[in-house]
Amino acid sequence: MSILSSATHVIFSQSKEIAGLNAKRSHILELLSAYLNFKSHAALTHSVSQNEAIIHAISHPEEAFKKLLLRANVLQLNCSTLFILKPIIESEIQRLTNDKTDLYLIMDLLGLRLSNKAYNPSKVDLEIDENLFKRLSYQAKNGNEEAHLVISLWHASKNATDKYVEDEDNDEDNEGSEYWYKQKLAGIDLAAHTLLWTNNYERELQIDDAVTLSYSSFEVTSLAKPAVFKTIQKNIPINFCWELDSLTVLRLLTSITAVDEDFDSYSYEQLNADEQIHREILLDWLMLSMIQTPNKHGLMDLIEQLSEPEMQWAWYYYGLSVQMDVTKSEHIAINADTGGENVGYGPIEVGGTDGLELLKIEPGAQEKAMSLSKKIIKQHSKFLIPHD
């Protein structure tokens, strides 16, 4: 699909209302390609510098429009009528730098969208090209928090794969790729099929290095956040983050923040400034994960980190709505030697979890907590899978 497909649709729809223009959809594609300084739409499609062309056109709109008018002359279109479309063209070209298509593509390939869980690391390397990364990196460097989040998750995902996935066949493939890559660097001629394999491996290395470099230039605080409390309290539309698998995102973000895995066992005051900020970010994602896929352990973890009685009770009431009472202890007999469930032999001790003791709450605040819990329940209902 052309990067201009959406823009072409919008502009073509508008052009049909302009008397005397009589432009076809193919004409609009060619005009926009000229606007981006390409000789044809075919040239744009095969170019490796699409992102740079978009950035240049946004920075030099008058120059870009002159090129569009020259192409219009070649196509024998009424140039004077095109000035009516000028602001729409500029707006649609600007929108190309804010399009979420690239974000969704990478999240789909990483299996981080709720609607697509088929994660395949090799597929990511095959389908993510340098142009896509350039566009994403440009958006991130220009303050797009969603693009920054995607790059950070991409980076963390690659690290997690390298660290935890132990596949002997995959290891052998990588060793072979690395060997032939070194042969190529040494100037040794390779067979065609080996060269293709080696070039793919080289490209993966370049993309991985670019992701790591781009990630290292950002601060974790500039990541997009679900803003759960603000969304619920003010009833504002959910953002891009709510479309992601928050439990997996939470795990990946924990691996790249300044806090260790036991950060929630410390009081807020025991954390340094960076850790406090990062804990607030992770807490936001933990809230979202409990809305998407609640579990008792996660709810208890969340409530223990909340310092306001009203918030604690709101999540407690929410837990009751999904049949999870965090104040109720669940004790079982376990084998003291093995730590497993008692099966009738060996020393016995009590295992399981103790219920939480919530902070005391005033009657007026309790009503607010119940009201807030209803808003949380409403958001949770959006993630329920309907049954026939």
Image (cartoon, rainbow, N blue to C red):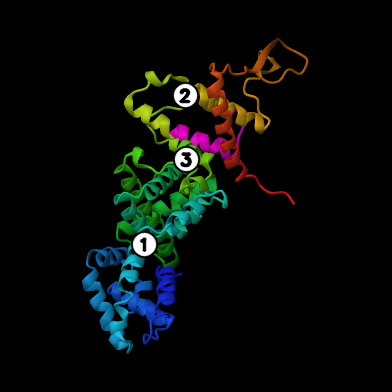
**What residue is disc 1 on?**
95
Q: Which residues are magenta?
A: 282-298
Mark 1 neighbour class, 10 Å CA radius: few under 14, some 14 to 19, many 20 or more: few
In depth, the one of 386 and 214 nearer the eye is 386
- Snapshot quadrant of residue 366: top right
- Snapshot quadrant of residue 6: bottom left
Residue 178 is covered by the magenta coloring: no
Q: Which mark is residue 234?
A: 3
Mark 3 neighbour class, 10 Å CA radius: few under 14, some 14 to 19, many 20 or more: few
Disc 2 marks which amino acid?
Asp
Closer to the observer: label 3 or label 2? 3
Disc 1 marks which amino acid?
Arg
**What residue is disc 2 on?**
264
For the point 38% across and 50% down, the residue is 147
Closer to the observer: label 1 or label 2? 1
Q: Earlier in the sequence, mark 3 or mark 2?
A: 3
The residue sitting at the bottom extreme is 76
